Amino acid sequence: MQRHRRIFLKWLGLGAGSLFLPTAWGQRYPSRPITLIVPWSPGGSTDLTARALAPTLEKILKVPVQVVNRTGGGGAVGHGAIAQARPDGYTIGIITLEVVLPPWVAQTKISADMFSPISLLVLNPVSIVVRKDAPWRTLQEFIDDLKRNPGRYKASGTAKWGSYDFARLGFLRTLGLKDEALPWVPTQGAAAALQELMAGGINVAFVAIGEAANLVRAGEARYLAFMTDSRFPAFPDIPTLKELGLDWTFASFLMAAAPKFTLPSVIDVLDKAFAQAVQEPEFVRFMQNANLVIRHLDRKQSLVFIQERAQAMNRVVQELGLKF
Amino acid sequence: MVWERLAALLGLGLGVLAWVLSSGLPKADGPGPELFPRILGTVLVLAGLYLFLAPARGPNPAGEGSGGWKAGLLFLLFLASPLLVPRLGLAPSAALVAGLATLVYGETWPRALLVALGIWALAYGVFVRLLGVPA
Amino acid sequence: MNAVSWDVLLALFLGSFYGAVFGAMPGLTATLALSLFIPFALFMPPEVGLAAIIGLTATAIFAGDMGAVMARIPGTPASAAYTEEIHDLAQERGATYALGISAVFSALGSLVGTGLLVVGSLGMAAVARQFSSFEYFWLVLLGVISGVLGSPHLLKGALAFALGMLLATIGYDPALGNPRFTFGQVNLLGGINFIVALIGLFGLSELLYQALGKEPLLPRPPSSLLRGSFTAYLWEPLRLALRERWLFLRSAFLGTFIGFLPGAGSDFAAWISANLKRTAGGSREQVVLAGTSANNAAVAGTWIPALSLGIPGDTLTAIVLGLFLTLGIRPGPELFSKNLGLVVEIYLVFLLASVLIMPLVGYMGALAAGLATRLPRKVLLGLIAGVSLIGVYAINNNPFDLYVAALLALLGLLLRLGDFPLGQVVLGLVLGPLLEQHLMVSMIKTHWNLLSFFERPVAILLALANLALVGSLLWLRLRQWQRLRALRNLAQPDREG
């Protein structure tokens, strides 16, 4: 079923692509308004980023860029709208981490390979947070305790199979532990998880660095480690998992993407526009204040990045034997 | 009270459906996703059964009007709207539905046209232009 | 004090008017209004943008009552709790009087909420932080119990309630994160959108009901709009306020308290407060005033955890927090030490919004309502059809939602014809997911140890509150029933037994 659908889409995409080839040559791209689809509701980080970028993109591309929220279906409706749009470069969107999370992909039948990445825009690394009075001073102490008492402590950060759940699963996998060693308590998001952490309902929270920053600055909570490649500028004292010998990074991301089979030349134009837009001082200030970390990768690197992420998540699923 | 029995029957049916469908849900150790729908299903079955067999005698709502066909037409109009929006765009579809609904209620042509125009202006001016709802 | 400049006043006024328009129109929620405003707010100085936002959120919740008065369609979910009462009131005593009650008690409720916001931003936050899923569970159960026992017919209420909760189970389940009852439909993965359901159940089903030729359900035009109605608009509700001061104070305090609990906003506050009064057998005026003072008090209440902890009290404050961060304002204890001027300004704007803006904008709304009732009924119904359709579509920009709304309209019509309470379906839609979420989270945390619900002091307290509520409500119903039977015995034999 899924396969038929894929083939059908591929055929549809090829047809549309060849149909629009002459126009793409005949006219300079872009020559009419561009629609930027946001699969999440207004006011969220994806929406805010898109709306902050749109005016600059308009200036660079010299055509109107209209931000459209296509919400519902847990992000499936909007992502589907991007993937199934006509691949002419006039309908693009911002895709999120969900497209590489195996449970979401299995449920929605939408996967990373249905998109042509334009630019990675935002990378929000995840942190391991504990309460200020937690018994562990360092991550190593926590890991030792966890190995001695598997299943004793509980973690949360989002819904079951949500983004931060995979941050935990990957962390456990690198430790050689199973899913049950640190059970996941499903909550409705980072704010709810931090509330549970404060109220003593859970022992560890896996949330984005920015989401816990207020509690940490107020002295109510502590970061044990970040799942970043290198130290995080705003908190230079917090070690990364890699430094501690654990090869695992995790971040939620926002990526500008077009439907598959969009012409590479068109994507190049868009990629350059995004690259320029994310450097605007106003946008940089906006993102800093929103605790969102700008990380631009060009279209080729973005493709490598998203494929690597999809493989890493699938590896976690296979090695832990997860069923969903 | 035929309507009351019908609604009770619907509740009963949905309760049974909740039980049947929840048996196909993935299992957790201990009660899982099926627990809550089953509680609700039980409530629906019990309440529906009781209300079906012994309908409550509340204040009788106004007797049967003659407008069954009107309601039917309106419902068809509502059902047609999701087919209209992707083809005609939001503003024309909303205007069409509002105008036709006004006619179904028995209003005159000019007024229905006025309603359609007003809704078109609202949909186009405020939503499509100002708020960027895709047409 | 230089905290309130002319810019701020202008922003407050414009924001309020914008909020009133969005709040009064079904399908346009305060959340939508705020989200669309955020991009503009980014280009304003923080105090100006915040003034507009406070005005917007404060009046949007109040203006939600207008839709309920005019067309029995709550403009925002927060008005759904007492839609039927306020609409009946408008039918009986004129739209101006109904809107007057709404405006006066919204303003007063907001005033109390503002007072508590000032006092409690630091102190109450410490209490709220003790709440984990156990406490939430009991609190939500309080809402469920009062909703079921508060309906006119117990079993019908329970059935309507369970229907709403069952509808809300569609989508990802909170325990394992798998889709439930979606029938393979990707559009249903995230569940049925609450606002889409609201418009379908209340708005479209009303249109169908009217088509059946039932009695007209639109308020009669107020007799003398300007001079005469002023008494109805301000004077009579104020006298009511004096008469019902304890009920009002209780509702406003309850509303603020529920508002400041993270995640529970003004709709929940209105439900609890209105239902408490309804189950106690309150008059329509009392139910409406309990609901409308609670939901407006809750608006200020949601800002307490937002300001003092950086944890949003509801979806609106979640968006506000997003704006705070983009503007470089960091909520939390340090906000009070570093940015006290801004905090004081927020308090002052809340004060102004409740004392000045709400009655003013409310009066403009009352005038507009008077004008709208002069439209021919059939024209108004046609307009409602159009606006509902736009509203349903604009929530997600997804045509699929129109099917959902149409089917729910049919369900709503059937329930209405069978004399089932529609409000309970909506209540189930709101509370069902919360109840299941907190139940499953609590149980997963403790490996199905049921005793854990009674281990924390606040949880025990709330459990006892539930027990007390069930006991007193059953007792009330029993007494009502006995009185009814005594009356029936007197009025024999023409009543069918």
Image (cartoon, grey):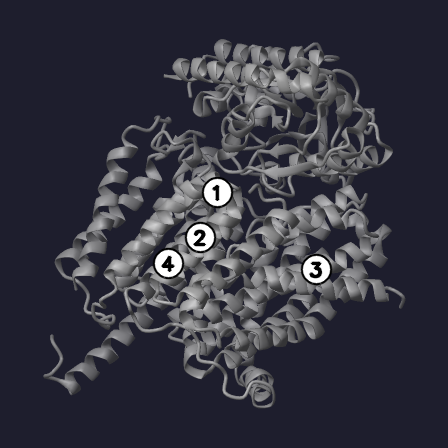
**Disc 4 marks which residue?**
C424
Is C16 placed left or right of C31 in the picture? right
Q: Secondary structure at mark 1?
A: helix
**Marks 1 and 2: CB-CB under 8 Å?**
yes
| Mark 3 vs 4, N-terminal side | 3
Could you tell me residue A315's position as x and y percent? Answer: 54, 10
Q: CA distance from mark 3 to mark 4?
A: 30 Å
What is the three-letter code of the residue carrying label 2? Leu
**Marks 2 and 4: CB-CB under 8 Å?**
no
What is the three-letter code of the residue carrying label 3? Ile
Is A263 placed left or right of B61 in the picture? right
Q: Nearer the viewer, residue C81 or C122?
A: C81
**Disc 3 marks which residue?**
C54
| Figure label count | 4
| Quadrant of the image containing the N terminus of chain C | bottom right
Marks 4 and 1: which is nearer the front? 1
